[in-house]
Every structure is written in structure tokens, then in C-alpha cells.
Amino acid sequence: MDFELKTLTSHQAASMAADALILLWPDRADEAAGGIDDPLTLWARGAVADKDIEPAAGSCLLAHRLPGVQPRRLALARAGDGSAAAVRKAVLAALKALPQDALKRLVLLAGNIAAPAVSAAVQAVSEASYRYVATKSQAKPRALQKVTVGVADAGAVRQAFEQGVAVAHGVEWAREWANRPGNHATPTLLAEAARQLGRQPKVSVEVLGPKEVAKLGMGAFMAVAQGSSEPLRFIVLKYQGAAKSSVPVVLVGKGITFDTGGISLKPAPEMDEMKFDMGGAASVLGTFAALARLQPAINVVGLVPSCENMPDGRAIKPGDVVTSMSGQTIEILNTDAEGRLILCDALTYAQRFQPRALIDVATLTGACVIALGGVRAGMYANRDELAQALYQAGEQALDPCWRMPLDDEYAEGLKSPFADMANVAGRPAGSVTAAKFLQKFVGEAPWAHLDIAGVAWKGGAAKGATGRPVPLLVQYLLDEASRLAQEPRRSAKTAAKTPRKR
């Protein structure tokens, strides 16, 4: 889908050839449009005055072939206070009301809205028009091909617009791969998709197979993979937007392409949704797709341990003890707590980069769904400043998270008489104890864990991946690039000799 940004008046928008026009109408427009007399504005002003449309953000009124307006279909969408959240709600409502199959070209007249709202509008168009067709024989692809976003001053919001387009691309990339069935998104196929990203500017990709992973000593990762006939893959992505001496942010994404639970088999109902268990991996790869477009001045490493969790005769059993890459031993009390096993080895591997920040993203626990539902991701961090940065990025990106506790007492349940630790600690505070398990493998790095089990996909009639938390991650990395630019510059020699403060 092609997005373009233009400076447009309502008169100019009304004269454009398009299948539909969405007119965003914030509350302040009720008075501001008083001196404008083009047909589009007169219609909207009259509808508001006659109370034909509710004042609440997301209320929508449709019209067809309005005299003096070129686009056949019109949608007047109330945008409340004009905030990013209100504009997003308005755009989603308008596109839901319009016939998707009839829309090839759309004009979205946003007027004088703020930059963050422009970004939100672009992402909402992409979200509402997305269609999954990869494994359907006769499904119609997305009809919408061209979207013109009209604003009062294109130059003033150009950067936000470009960010919105890049994030929309990354989210769509993540949704597409998370939506694919397990037999169409194996670890090998996911690695091939990552290699495609490696063709983008400033992005490189290395894929390690079973022999290389065994040489690294990733015993926990290999233990999960051994029950499947599909070979594991360890994907290493690097985006270099800053000097080589600049330490990177490292993102780690859980890449279980299908999770049966292993010997601790999951219940049959809704097990098909375990294809979404690589949502963390998909979001990391989607973030790299966005980075390649935005080109921020920061270095980022992405690590994706990917395998299946299957229950064949070679699978790990409850009670087995495995040795992680860190040398720590783990008693497997529940084979369905496999995500933390592949992540712990990736977190150990990440320490070789001496990361500026280390962030893992995983559909890790059902307990997090119980705690926070599908609104906010659970966020754990061992540094207050990192937690605050992620929280603020989530709020700005409309992809919110919530900080959860990491008290040492929560790790008591992980004690084992047969290994250095167990991989589970019982049902109480299950998301917290999972985070405490991961914390044992991060060393001194500034670290955060995002449990996205409640936000990575939706079930029911709206079943499908959401692409979260790509918006949060991209916003955090852009903010971090800005912070990096303000830090005193050091030469490569100085950076190598001077230990970085933790």
C-alpha cells in the first residue's frame, strides 16, 4: 500500500479522484469551520449542528455522491480532542463503516492535527485494511492501494508521517508471519524471512543451525528443540545506524513457531493459537523492517531463538536437568514452560555485545493475560530509567505496557534440590516468577522483559496477530537514538578502553 502526504484544503480534497474520503472532525472544528463554505465543510458542519452524528470520538456518518465532492463515498469521523488515541479511534471506525472491497484509493483529510495523530492515523489505516491471504486459495487481497493523507501543513508533520508509515510496515510484517500456520512458518522459513530483511540498507543477518548452537553450548535451547523433526534456527540480525564503537541495544524475541506444550501437553481447545507463540520473534523482525526504513542513528542487534515444542520420543521430560549456555543447570518441571528455556540461552549470548539495553519480548505466560488482559503488556526491568523509557514509549506509540514487580522473594519458588534452579515456580505470580527466571541470565546488563501473551494476538471472531509491540519498540529505539545523540562522543579507542557505566 502506498501512502502519500499532501498539504490539502477541504476544497482540494473534495476535488480529488478517489473511491472514498474520510474527513476527520475534532471537537475544535465545530467553531473553526465557521467561515469556510465549500460543499464538504458545509455538509460536515450541518451534520454536527443537526446532531446527525454523535460528538464522541469514533462516531461516524456516511454519505454517498455528495454534490460538489468528487469521491463517491464520504465518511465524517469525530476525532474528539484530536489526540493520537482519538484520531486512531476515528479512522478505525470510518474504515469499518466503508465497504473495503470498493476502496482502491482513499483520501484522509486530517486538517490541522498534531504530528503524533498523523502517525496514528497512518497506522490505523494499515491496521484496518490488512488482510491475511498467504494460505487461502481464493481470498481477495487488500483492495486499498493508494492513501493520500491531507493536512494543513505537510512539512510540519513529515517526520511523524514517515514514522507512521515505517511502523505500519513493521507491524504488518509481524502480523503476517505470526498469522501463518506452523507448517508455513517453521524455524527454517522464519530464518529465510529474516534473510530477506538482511537485504535492506544497514541490516545484516546471520543464521545459526543445530551444529553452531551446540558448539555455543546452548543446552536449554537445544533441549526444547530436540522433540521436533524441524531443525532449530538461531537468527542474529544487526542494524548499524551509528558508529561501530557505539554499543547496541539488543532485542531478543521468543520464536516458538508452534507450541504443543511438549510432554506437558496443552489442552486441545484453542491449541491452534499456539502458532502465535512466535509473536515475540515476529515483533523483533518487524522492528528491524521499520528500522530499515527510518534509518535512525543507533545500533541494534536482534536475537531470535526459534524452534518447535513437540512431544515425540526424544522430547525433554518433566524432571530432566539441562545445562544452559551460562553453565547454570535447570530442572524441567514443566515442558510447557519452554519459552524461558530458549530465551535464557539467547540472553546469555546477548552479553557478548555489552548492550546499552537488553530487552526480551515473549508470549511467555498465561498468568500475564490474567493479570493485565489484552490492553497492556507486562513489563519487568532491573533499571528504573529503562522501565520509564519503555513506559513512555508505549504511551506515545499507543502500545502500552505496565511495570510489574521483581522482588527477590518471588525467586524462592524456583529453587530445586536437583539443579541450580527449576524452570517453574507454581501458579501464584506466574508471570513474575518467569521474569525472575530470565533475570538469572542477564548478568549486569540493563534489562527489560516484555510479556506480550495478552497483546500479541486476538482470539474469537477477530482472531489474528496484532503486531504488538512493534510500535513500542520502534518508539523506544527512536527515543534512545535521540538520547545517544546528546551523549558526549568518544573515539573508538576510548570506547574500547573505558568501561561503560552500568
Image (cartoon, grey):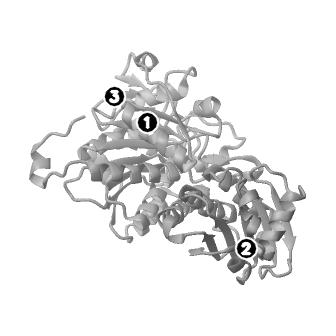
Image point (77%, 79%), residue name = 71
| Front tag of 2 and 1 | 1
Determine the residue located farthest toward the front in the rendered image: 35
Residue type marked 2 = Lys
| Front tag of 2 and 3 | 2
* Label 3 – label 1 distance at C-alpha: 33 Å
| Side of 437 relative to 370 (left or right) | left
Q: Which residue is mark 2?
A: 140
State whether residue 99 appears in this view. no
Q: Which residue is mark 1?
A: 388
Query: Could you say which quadrant of the image residue 207 lies in?
Result: bottom left
Q: Indicate whether 60 appears above or below 13.
A: above
Image point (42%, 64%), residue name = 294
Residue type marked 3 = Thr
Q: Secondary structure at mark 1?
A: helix
- Residue closest to the eye, 133 or 371: 371
Image point (72%, 41%), residue name = 269
